[in-house]
Amino acid sequence: MKKTKIAISVNPTLLAQIDAKVDGSIIRSRSQAMEYYLQKGLQESSITTAVLLIRGSHHDICLKTINNATLLQKQIQFFANSGIKKVLIVTQHSTLTNKLLLETEKAPIETTIIEKEAKGNAQALHAIKDQLPDTFIVMSGDTYNKFDLTKMIKKHLGADKLASMGLMTRSIAATYGNAILDGDLIIDFQEKPKAISSNIVNAGIYIFKKEIFELFEKSSSLEKDIFPKIARIKQLLGFFTHGEYEHLE
């Protein structure tokens, strides 16, 4: 392919770092070094894999119809619209598993069902860690989200934290506690009195670095075990989704 010549201004320190990568063997020139690391940076700036965590007992929820499409179809389309290329559905077997399989056949992107017995969503996620890339998205299978996911991805990649959690405000206190923020960081989860009319709660969608699995030992629940732990070490970024949300039951 014919290449286009361009002229750019580069910080001298950065240029020295680029020149240091020229080894005369694999990378033979400054131009090749710049092209290689630009391509590498672009690849690392996107997230292409998402995980849906669905309890076997919630398969009927995934098959519920919302505006002429099932919840599962809408979830997969939401990911497809945000540039996701692959969806892994982690669940357990049920009498509705075959119907779930039929739904995935209609998917616009690669979608795979993986059956794993687990006591909680943290265990279910941990069971497929070897199939996950360095950074990936996770969403609860009983929630419907529609917002600009690309903004959440951009914020997560720019912050360089272990995890990001989608947030929203609700008048009713959350089951696992309300998020306590310090700037953009979630630093704790706390039950609040019913008298408080506005609460920041978990929207059921997350972005994780793969290193997070180092904290999964003896954990079964993301909400009860993992998120409070990440919040305490100031590695949990909050992102307000500002879009459509529904928790189906």
Image (spheres, rainbow, N blue to C red):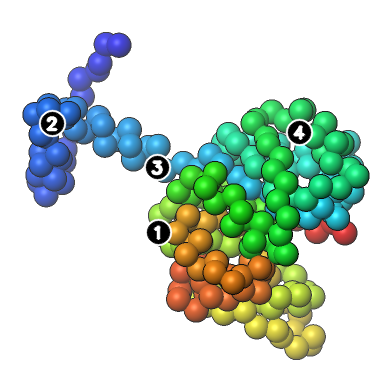
Q: Residues within 10 Å of mark 4 (few under 14, many from 20)?
A: many
> Where is mark 1, residue-wise?
160
| Residue 134 vertical position relative to residue 165 in the rendered view, above or below | above
Q: Which badge, 4 or 2, is on the more N-terminal residue?
A: 2
> Where is mark 3, residue-wise?
44
> Where is mark 4, residue-wise?
104
| Residue 165 vertical position relative to residue 148 in the rendered view, above or below | below
- Gap between marks 4 and 3 measured at Cα: 27 Å
Q: Which badge, 3 or 2, is on the more N-terminal residue?
A: 2
The answer to whether residue 200 shows anywhere in this view is no
Mark 1: secondary structure: loop
Q: Is residue 199 left or right of residue 47?
A: right
Q: Which badge, 4 or 1, is on the more N-terminal residue?
A: 4
Residue at the image position 45 percent from the left and 76 percent from the top: 233
> Where is mark 2, residue-wise?
30
Task: Residue lying at the far front in this picture: please name it.
Answer: 117
Q: Which badge, 3 or 1, is on the more N-terminal residue?
A: 3
* Residue 217 location (% of width, % of height): 54, 69
Mark 4: secondary structure: helix
Q: Residues within 10 Å of mark 2 (few under 14, many from 20)?
A: some
Task: Residue lying at the far top in this picture: please name it.
Answer: 2
Q: CB of mark 4 within 8 Å of CB of mark 3? A: no
Q: Residues within 10 Å of mark 1 (few under 14, many from 20)?
A: few
* Residue 79 location (% of width, % of height): 64, 40
- Gap between marks 3 and 1 measured at Cα: 12 Å
Q: Which badge, 2 or 1, is on the more N-terminal residue?
A: 2
Callout 3 amino acid: Glu
Callout 1 amino acid: Asp
Out of 129 and 133, give the one closest to the viewer.
Answer: 129
